[in-house]
Amino acid sequence: MLIYKDPPEAQKAPPAQNIEMQNGFLRVRVLSASSEEPLAKATVMIYSEDGGAPQTQKVLVTGVDGNTETVALSAPAIKYSLLATSVIVPYSRYTIRVEYPGYYTNIYKNAQVFAATTTIQESSMDPLPFGVKQAPGMEKVYTIPETGPGIAR
């Protein structure tokens, strides 16, 4: 028989302002879904949402290889992911918006960035139908499932 107990007070999540943060890293690779060719000069916007309105963290442009530069973003300290008893989600969540002329806009919600680790988000862009111009609402939204302490699976 298994008996589950609440973690001791010392293990409970501290208020958000007291969580130690470190840098995690993110790079986005943008490809055409139809040809798998890299898309140079795609615009990539990275947003954080801390319970309020989205805050723009970075605006990037892909190079000829379809990659953005690797950027540093804030994430909970690595110690939170190393403790089996931690109740703190060991990553920060970001929204990534990828735009390229003639293609649907891709939006990735809950992209996970861990401290001291590089996350690579690939974005496979679908071309718009022939003769269709980009318009608001022509977006494909992908929600990345969350994992970690206290998150139902």
Image (cartoon, grey):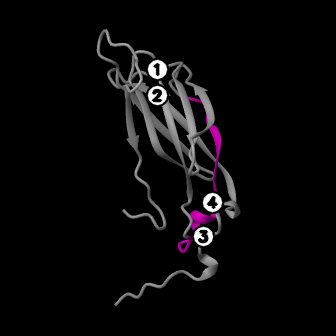
Whether the residues at callouts 1 and 4 have beta carbons within 8 Å, the answer is no
Q: Amino acid at mark 2?
A: Val
Mark 1 or 3, closer to the camera: 3
Badge 1 marks a residue whose secondary structure is loop
- Judging by the rendered image, the residue that carries numbered circle 2 is 30
The disc, 2 or 1, on the residue closer to the chain's N-terminal end is 2
Q: Which residue is mark 1?
A: 100
**Residue sticking out furthest to the front:** 52
Q: Which mark is residue 13?
A: 3
Callouts 2 and 1 close, C-beta under 8 Å: yes
Residue that extends furthest to the left in the rendered view of this protein: 129
Residue 78 is tagged as 4
**Residue type pointed to by label 4:** Ile
Residue closer to the observer: 49 or 92: 49
Alpha carbons under labels 4 and 3: distance apart: 15 Å
What is the three-letter code of the residue carrying label 1?
A: Tyr
In the image, residue 71 sits, relative to residue 93, either above or below, namely above
Q: Quadrant of the C terminus?
A: bottom left
- Residue 50 percent coordinates (x, y): 59, 50
Q: Which label belongs to residue 9?
A: none
